[in-house]
Amino acid sequence: MSENNIVEVENLQTVFSTAAGDVPAVGGVSFTLGRNETLGIVGESGSGKTVLSRTIMGLQPRTNVTVTGSVKINGFEVVGASEKEKRSIWGTEVAMVFQDPMTSLNPTMKIGKQIDEALRVRLGMSKADAKKRAIELLELVGIPSPAERYNAYPNALSGGMRQRVVIAAALACSPKLLMADEPTTGLDVTIQAQILNLLDELKERLQMSVVLVTHDLGVVATRTSRIIVMYAGRIVETGTTEQVFNRHRMPYTKALLESSPRVADASHTRLKAIPGRPPNLLKLRDGCAFAPRCSFATDKCHSQRPELEESVETGHKFACWNPLPITGAAN
Amino acid sequence: MSNTLEETAVFEKPEKKEPMGPLFWICVGWIALNLLGAVFANVLPLTNPLFENYNVINAGPSIHHFFGTDDLGRDIFSRVIYGSRVSISVGIGAMLIGFGIGAPLGMLTAYRRGRLDTIVTTVMYVFLAFPAIIATIAILSFWTPRALFKIIVVIGLASVPLVYRVMRTATMNVATKDYVIAAKVQGATDRRILFKELLPNVAPIAVSFLLIGIASVITLEGALAFLGLSVNPPTPSWGNMINESRTVMAQNPWLVIFPSLALCMFLLCLNFIGDRLRQHFDVTEVKL
């Protein structure tokens, strides 16, 4: 099984120690990701998506955090590895695209240099070869006249162009896995589509696996093969994109889908918002974390936490005591 | 697959850097003139600053003595130029010591964090809580005989916690930026991150703090000289010239005016240069 998986996450927990108490930002997450597959991780702000993706990368802060469980990237155990060991997979096995292209490029370095740094350090290329490759990469991500742009500083580029440069830098050492943490949140809608299409295209061309972290269901709808829905640091539903969108069983998934606008809706249709707020992770109770906001909640939901269980179809799992009927809400 | 964009307006034309302006260059010129004067004071055709000419006591500015003479008939012009030697070398020397120790320490602890950071920062803050000027005065009064290098070392060490705090805060601010994390996950080593990612981005802050620091150290030397704790008279420094002549200020105001003017101009120019440089090198401002 492990041969076909690029990522295997097993009961991963990330707990931050704060003055107010322990915050379980990721509370026991397990999943696997196959080669050349795109996985979407969705959830509200504060549901633990970003912490999960950074923990998978091995990027947790140096202090006040405890990570348990296991993350294997192409067989490499990330949890417990030192920075020096992780440096052997960073860039070549796994790379990351950040949320805000305005802050993910060094303002004092030419964009070309920021790409060929990695090539020279990690792959030991000569200066001239690295430059050539960096220009190729800039061309690959669709930067016009890449040879001239090589010498540009980030402040001469627009947001969408910067995100392309960030992607080029991430792809420099041909990683097998690309973690994209809200890659389009900082961009306007037309540029969003361009960047997502670019990621898709590159994934096919370079035979990568992609993890797409987002709060925007529209982003994952057409581009992922599987989806993980997170709530309060746990997976509440997972399955193929089709299963999650059309045959979801967890009321939270339903609420999340209903709260995004649809083109088919008449104008001035009120959006359904999920009542209440995400729970305070410091004060998680025994029951289902979504219970206080859920219209289906019973006493059992408040006292006992449901575990992920298989739905009728294989691969489709959800954590709920009172799941929606199997027919689900058809879209 | 042609995903090159048809859009042409996506790139801003790299705008021309705004010129520094004449005032900046006047200031640089003034500082350069002062530095040259300090370095070549004994080569220049100046009267010996210690030579007491009793024929011209308390004279006003004239063609023979541009700034006049003091109550012992010493040439003020020559003394102001020789005096810049003490002031400038204390300013630059002390800041070199302060930055030499404080800057690498601050950057390192801010980047590595952890226990080392806690320990070093606590120690530095304890020193910061203790008034530096009192400590300097105390040490200098007991560390006799007085010498220029001792003043430089004491003020330099006293400035370490200040430099440390500024550099640590600036570095921490940069170290949490995504581009530092991005460099890290591309496999950059700690040394590369410190020198290529952090250093260039804290440099503008460091440079302007350095220049303002030199200015404050020169003022501090003036204060020490005023208390008689700087170099021993008759060696001139801007501070002790002001100190010595304050008693005869009513009879001969030139004695106070010229060294004060020299001090004041030097500091103003330094501050202005520091400010202007910070603006000029601040590429971090997003202009979209």
Image (spheres, rainbow, N blue to C red):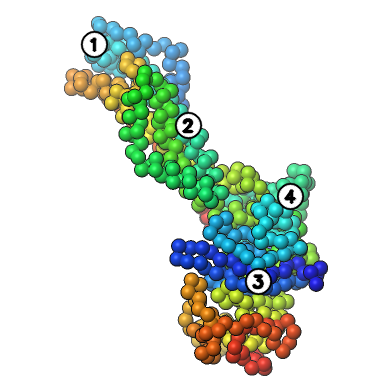
Q: CA distance from mark 3 to mark 2?
A: 52 Å
Amino acid under label 1? Ile
- From the image, which quarter does the N terminus of chain A lie in? bottom right
First reached walking from the N terminus: tag 3 or tag 4 = 3
Q: Which of labels 4 and 1 is toward the front?
A: 4
Residue A88 appears at what percent x and percent y? Answer: 72, 53
Q: Are marks 2 and 1 on the same chain?
A: yes
Residue B99 appears at what percent x and percent y? Answer: 49, 36
Going 75% across and 43% down the picture, which residue do you hit? A127
**Label at residue B97:** 2
**Label at residue A11:** 3
Q: Are marks 3 and 2 on the same chain?
A: no
Amino acid under label 4? Arg
Residue B128 appears at what percent x and percent y? Answer: 38, 42
A39 up-or-down from B170: above or below: below
Give the residue number, with chain letter if any, for mark 1.
Answer: B57
Q: Residues within 10 Å of mark 4 (few under 14, many from 20)?
A: many
Image position of B189 (left or right of B132): right
Q: Which of labels 3 and 2 is toward the front?
A: 3
Q: Chain of mark 3?
A: A
Q: Are marks 3 and 2 in contact (CB under 8 Å)?
A: no
Q: Picture quarter containing residue B214?
A: top left
